[in-house]
């Protein structure tokens, strides 16, 4: 800024000086006398100025002629391009000026101006790797996909610009949503430059999104070798990919390979909950129950989770509730004060009909963190201890409107999912799911809760029924005097509920109207129910 101002001031000073000299000469009337070869020339003020201008022009022309003579001399000495370079020098200068203007226009957001300057530069310069690159970038910025594609394809023939061209075409395919062609381009770019960080990330994302878990693991290994990924993070993400590879093998029906892959995923990251649960089941299938218990205890110590408890219960599916409670003590002792441990202990005590012990294990959780699961347990405990019916109805009403509790939530887009996946289906973030309560401020929509307590039931048939347990029907409870609670977030998008119709007379068989008929009609609410049946209805 200061240099530009200085040049403007200098130019104005020179113009002012010349104007002053011209005015002085005009007023003085003095003549300029010049002697050349014994000849005297007398010039007036105006003629003097014209003579000076002609002299400057002659000097400039002389310098140009001298440059031409030098170029001819070099040409005669064997430099075949000396004369052409002399005549092209001005052309190149104008071309580079146009190229610079185009780059500045592109950086300023003037895409159309950049395309025009790129066309001018391509006519003046014999540098297609520069002018075509500017044309492609300007066409992309202007939204002209066809021109951009042609420019990128033209750059593929030059080895120097081949990687840049592949990346440009890759960006276009990603913007169009053509993941199949984008994957092929990403693989080609990765082959050209395996250590390019952006290409590694794009290829890893496309491979994982397409289910190519083996290829994704190879790409992840290259990221580790190139220093783009810490080893600790690499081990966790490699475990995620190995876990998905195990699931794929399991879907294909190769149980042996699935078991080995699941066990490998757990070894890579012992604290990964899905890997620990699948590895434990794989070890049980191999007959190694002791190793399965050890795997789950180690994962529980890192973070208690219902899936780990369900897998721990599946180790001995036919045991009695008392034996199950005794066996679970070793697992729960790893994190005795954690909320999940206390809820699990309360469910196990309920199965043994130790209602006082279950109430003690539950503690203040229904008041401090009132979730559907905690309130369902409280309702089962109160029913077992003979609580009055209005009090029990109030608890069940709270359970209807309570949040579901911790779920797999994406830290990037806050979406809540029913099952763990390595890539969030909403934002396509990799390794972004954590087990926590959904963030209501971001409008997270849970996709369903985890089974509340399939492991408190005594046999496989009860376990299968627990997996398909229904939600609480509004017809099963009455309105209470409790203040209105916020409506729970539905497990999946459903149409808005219509106002409840007025109560109608009971059907001849004693069932409330609207409740679907079953082979064995459930007892009315005021009849004696088992605690596990109340827990099943509440979930």
Image (cartoon, rainbow, N blue to C red):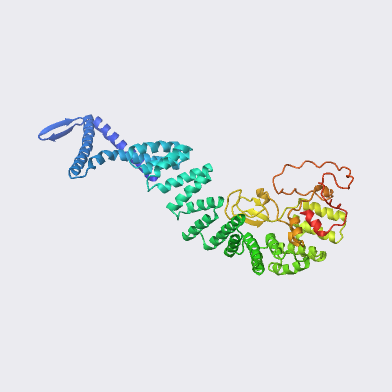
Taking depth in this image into account, of 300 and 77 the one nearest to the observer is 300
Relative to 4, does residue 437 appear above or below in the rendering? below
Location of residue 37 (image quadrant): top left
Picture quarter with the N terminus: top left
Who's the residue at 45% across and 40% down the image? 149
The tally of labels here is 0
Which image quarter: residue 129?
Answer: top left
Residue 46 coordinates in the image, percent (x, y) = 23, 29
Residue under the image location 90 percent in, 45 percent down: 508
- Percent coordinates x, y for residue 162 in the rendering: 40, 47
Q: Quadrant of residue 256?
A: bottom right
In this view, the residue in front, 98 or 513, is 513
Residue 45 horizontal side relative to residue 455, left or right = left
* Quadrant the C terminus occupies: bottom right
The location of residue 85, given as percent across then percent down, is 26, 41
Q: Is residue 300 visible?
A: yes
Expressed as whole percent of the image width and height from the top left, the position of residue 515 reads: 82, 46
Q: Is residue 5 visible?
A: no
User: Which sits in the foreground, 532 or 254?
Assistant: 254
Relative placement, left or right, of 234 versus 44 is right
């Amino acid at each position: 800024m200061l240099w530009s101002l200085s040049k403007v001031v200098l130019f104005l000073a020179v113009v002012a000086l010349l104007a002053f000299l011209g005015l002085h000469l005009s007023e003085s009337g003095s003549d300029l006398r010049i002697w050349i070869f014994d000849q005297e020339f007398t010039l007036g003020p105006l003629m003097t100025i014209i003579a000076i201008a002609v002299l400057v022009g002659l000097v400039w022309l002389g310098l140009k002629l001298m440059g031409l003579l030098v170029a001819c001399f070099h040409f005669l000495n064997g430099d075949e391009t000396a004369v052409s370079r002399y005549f092209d020098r001005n052309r190149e200068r104008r071309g580079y000026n146009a190229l610079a203007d185009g780059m500045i226009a592109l950086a300023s957001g003037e895409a159309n101006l950049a395309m025009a300057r790129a066309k001018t530069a391509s006519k003046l310069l014999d540098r297609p790797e520069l002018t075509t690159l500017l044309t492609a970038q300007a066409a992309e910025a202007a939204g002209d996909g066809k021109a951009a594609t042609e420019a990128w394809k033209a750059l593929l023939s030059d080895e120097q610009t081949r990687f840049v061209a592949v990346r440009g075409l890759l960006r276009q395919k990603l913007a169009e949503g053509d993941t199949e062609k984008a994957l092929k381009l990403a693989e080609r770019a990765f082959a050209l430059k395996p250590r390019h960080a952006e290409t590694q990330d794009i290829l890893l994302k496309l491979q994982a999104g397409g289910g190519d878990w083996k290829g994704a693991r190879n790409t992840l290994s290259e990221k580790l070798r190139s220093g783009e990924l810490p080893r600790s993070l690499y081990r966790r993400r490699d475990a995620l990919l190995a876990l998905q590879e195990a699931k794929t093998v399991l879907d294909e029906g190769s149980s042996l390979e699935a078991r080995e892959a699941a066990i490998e995923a757990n070894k890579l990251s012992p604290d990964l909950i899905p890997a620990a649960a699948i590895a434990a089941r794989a070890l049980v299938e191999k007959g190694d129950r002791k190793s399965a218990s050890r795997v789950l205890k180690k994962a529980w110590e890192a973070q208690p989770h219902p899936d780990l408890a369900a897998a721990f219960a599946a180790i001995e599916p036919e045991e009695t509730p008392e034996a199950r409670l005794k066996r679970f003590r070793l697992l729960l002792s790893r994190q005795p004060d954690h909320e999940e441990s206390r809820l699990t202990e309360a469910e196990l005590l309920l199965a043994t009909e130790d209602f006082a012990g279950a109430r003690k294990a539950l503690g203040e959780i229904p008041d401090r963190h009132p979730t559907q699961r905690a309130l369902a347990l409280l309702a089962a405990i109160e029913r077992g201890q003979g609580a009055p019916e209005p009090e029990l109805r109030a608890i069940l009403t709270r359970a209807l409107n309570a949040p579901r509790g911790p779920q797999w939530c994406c830290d990037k887009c806050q979406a809540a999912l029913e099952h763990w996946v390595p890539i969030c289906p909403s934002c396509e973030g990799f390794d972004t799911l954590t087990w926590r309560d959904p963030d209501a401020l971001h409008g997270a929509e849970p996709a369903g809760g985890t089974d509340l307590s399939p492991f408190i039931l005594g046999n496989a048939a009860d376990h299968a029924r627990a997996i398909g347990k229904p939600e609480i029907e509004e017809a099963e409870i009455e309105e209470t005097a409790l203040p209105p609670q916020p409506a729970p977030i539905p497990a999946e998008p459903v149409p808005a509920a219509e106002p409840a119709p007025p109560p109608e007379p009971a059907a001849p068989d004693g069932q409330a109207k609207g409740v679907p008929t079953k082979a064995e009609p459930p007892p009315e609410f005021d009849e004696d129910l088992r605690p596990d049946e109340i827990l099943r209805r509440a979930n």
